[in-house]
Image: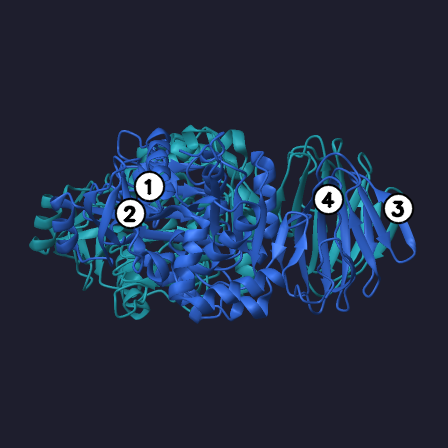
Chain colours: A cyan, B blue
Amino acid sequence: MSTERIHPVVLSGGSGSRLWPLSRAGYPKQFLPLAGENSMLQGTMQRVAGSQFAAPLMICNDEHRYVVAEQLRTAGITANRIILEPIGRNTAPAVAVAALTLLEQQEDALMLVLPSDHVIQNEPAFHAAIAQAEKAARQGHLVTFGITPNKPETGYGYIQQAEELSVSGVHKVARFVEKPDFDTAATYVASGEFLWNSGIFLFSAKQYLDELKAHHPKMVKACQAALELAENDLTFCRLNKEAFANSPSDSIDYAVMEKTTHAAVVPVDMNWSDLGAWSALWDITEKDSDGNASHGDVLLHNTRNSYVHADHALVAVTGLDDVIVVATDDAVLVANRDNAQDVKKIVDTLKEQGRYEHTLHTTVHRPWGNYRGIDLGERYQVKRISVKPGEQLSLQKHYHRAEHWIVVKGTALVTCGEKEFLVRENESTYIPMGEVHRLKNPGKVELELIEVQSGGYLGEDDIVRLEDGYGRTQ
Amino acid sequence: MSTERIHPVVLSGGSGSRLWPLSRAGYPKQFLPLAGENSMLQGTMQRVAGSQFAAPLMICNDEHRYVVAEQLRTAGITANRIILEPIGRNTAPAVAVAALTLLEQQEDALMLVLPSDHVIQNEPAFHAAIAQAEKAARQGHLVTFGITPNKPETGYGYIQQAEELSVSGVHKVARFVEKPDFDTAATYVASGEFLWNSGIFLFSAKQYLDELKAHHPKMVKACQAALELAENDLTFCRLNKEAFANSPSDSIDYAVMEKTTHAAVVPVDMNWSDLGAWSALWDITEKDSDGNASHGDVLLHNTRNSYVHADHALVAVTGLDDVIVVATDDAVLVANRDNAQDVKKIVDTLKEQGRYEHTLHTTVHRPWGNYRGIDLGERYQVKRISVKPGEQLSLQKHYHRAEHWIVVKGTALVTCGEKEFLVRENESTYIPMGEVHRLKNPGKVELELIEVQSGGYLGEDDIVRLEDGYGRTQ
């Protein structure tokens, strides 16, 4: 058996709409600390940080690049690469790009493909399964991880296992099946032959590409072109948009696993959850004696088996069982725990209505820090802006608004027209309409300021970037 | 029959805790536009604005004086007097004070006592009942209004009617009964003899006082002293606190109606509600085809027979029946419609925990306008301040905070130390710690400004008032 390390490939593609309003497209669930102190992305990375693993390769939406970089930094993870998708093409092309990247580094690279938004509470079981899967993968199998089902879940696809391979604990795949109805799911669970399809895979990069070339040559070509024409910048690699857009969109399952004759499955019981709905979060969260899981400033009276998350305001619940309540500063969800999947329908309605609450949070993350809208009037708005030490916003100007900045923490280095000066805590400055300006945190602690914008048009798009440290001037 | 006009006496005493979080002690339900465009206080006043009524006499909590004055002003109501209670003593002393005040104006004054937080949807029926009650009152009866019950409500006291008086439609009272249990309430409703006790009365001021003197001489003396020592200021009359505190606390029912031999009741069916809980608001509100009553930015999916009130954020509900959801910017209530009374238990818990959400809203009303907390940090807070045209805050200073003011609407006249100057829209000024300052709106439109406070202590009590137009310098 090889002593080469396994390459984790972490996929961050989903928008997590079933965990709305906490999870939104601009900052979806994998970045949220929903199941502990760390985000699920960080948890995923930390589970594969042992000596048997190489540095992880990350594939994410271009828009999330700074969130990903920041989360890896705070978790102490150094990525092999962070590959940026300018457009989503499902998992098969993403993994193809990862495989092509790894093959350049190591001919016999094994890749462990991991969604970034799963929770695994039994880590030793996971690692044991990886060790078994590794053996099978080195023998030429494409191994998928099958979760031992504990209830007739209708939200997952299933894998029927066949005979055990020569590698103990790893089975041939008899067939993949789509999400079943409840009765079918019940017979699957009773049979003992069926496993939940977790979306976790372990296989050789070369072999994955060979399979893909055989079944989807166009996809491989598009991915190769996207990589060849990519912009590379330190650890980031931004795929070429036009080239990547030429790739068909497909999942690993459809594109490869259901077609290959080398599919294998390793059954594993590891307290796994994909947190596909608020009810799943209730399942894995510690509960009080009434069966309630709560987070934040929550007051419960005569309430049972409920999940209550207060992100912002006090949330009081009385006389209800089996409800989900999630309150953020701009959206409140109240749902039946038994139909928690229906949250997606709310999000669909928001999309149809052209609203923003399914994509943006009131706190918006930027490479230099974040801002949060705290008040909005007819001709003004108020934001709290946080700038990380050493970071700066772009050199910019606005045609339709003036800005008042009051520093409430730290020190700002302000450029306004030809002048450059410091603004300290409890000091303020004024940026006239049309004036070129820049905000920088030259210090060692977070800079916080209150910005009052005043003008006839206050949209985020009234910004002319003259110079930017994060490549946003085009 | 006399052609003298009836004197409406409107009582504003309750804190409306069952309609939390919209209703809070500092700004309770009678001031809220819960059942239409006007507040319930305004609705109460407008129902007795016809030519058969004299100008209303208002009795309210001292702390609510400017809210009451402002609501009367915007509704175009001129009060006879606004009597301020420095301390609550239940309804019997409040009505005694009103009776004493009216007797000075007119010896045979008839008073119509009205709680300020009721809804009456059938106004002609109400006026017809008043006309009947007036006849009986002029004949020496103390008339209470009994609502024809339409369900076995356990939240109200009941009145059993006896034979009809010589005045058509008015009955002698057989007895008053306390809130019954459900089964008793059901037999009451079935009997046809029982009516809900509405807390609305019509009687002669002199006769009420005579009854009170006979049964509670100490109460009448305390009320007389409180009036004699009262501070009078335009339409306001602030009762003397020490004197009024000597009055026993009691209700009209206990103190007079259950003791007098002249009690009468006029049965009336007028779509009355005391809005004693959110479920009562659901009852009287127009509903969609699924039985939902909603207000504000609400999204419903697979939800029936629910009341959803979005005051601040978007509220989405899915898969639930018979729920109450009320979301404000600092508190969210989710309750079972069948146990909506239990909201009081939430409020009790907030009291026990020494919190503020049951007394204060984030928007705080002041005689000069209002302010709203919009952000709060470790050493700063941000408020939006609105000052009415012509109004000004007190001349004041703070020991622990400096203030930045940015005008976002209108024009401010600012006093800061020895200087006085105008600050216009999109201009700002700075008030150093310890500096004497004043804010005035000299203009004809509302003044709005963003205040950023900065300092080590930011409590409302860090204020030294040197001069105040509203008597708040002591």
Residue A117's spot in the image, x, y percent?
A: 39, 53
Quadrant including the C terminus of chain B: bottom right
Q: Which residue is mark 4?
A: A394
Q: Residues within 10 Å of mark 3 (few under 14, many from 20)?
A: few
Question: Foreground residue, B450 or A77?
Answer: B450
Which quadrant is home to the N terminus of chain B? top left
Q: What is the distance, in whole Å, between disc 2 and disc 3 at their CAs?
A: 64 Å
Seen as rendered, the residue at the extreme right is B418
Q: Where does the image place residue A190, in percent across and percent down from the top left?
A: 7, 54
Looking at the rendered structure, whether the residues under marks 1 and 4 are on a common chain is answered as: no
Amino acid carrying label 4: it is Ser
Q: Nearer the viewer, mark 3 or mark 4?
A: 3
Crowd band around label 2 with a 10 angstrom C-alpha radius: few (<14), some (14–19), many (20+): many
Disc 4 from disc 2: Cα separation:
78 Å
- The residue labelled by disc 1 is B136
Q: Quick check: can you spot residue B238?
A: yes
Q: Amino acid at mark 3?
A: Phe
N-term mark: 2 or 3: 2
Instruction: Determine which residue is flagged by label 3.
Output: B421
Q: Which mark is residue B238?
A: none
In the picture, measured across the screen, residue B59 lies left or right of residue A279, that is right
Report how far apart the C-alphas of labels 1 and 2 lie in the structure: 8 Å
Q: Chain of mark 4?
A: A
Residue visible at 57% across and 65% down in the picture: B225
Q: Nearer the viewer, mark 2 or mark 3?
A: 2
Which of the two residues, A430 or B10, is positioned nearer the viewer here? B10
Label 4 Cα neighbours within 10 Å, binned few <14 / some 14-19 / many ≥20: many
Depth check, mark 1 against mark 4: the one in front is 1
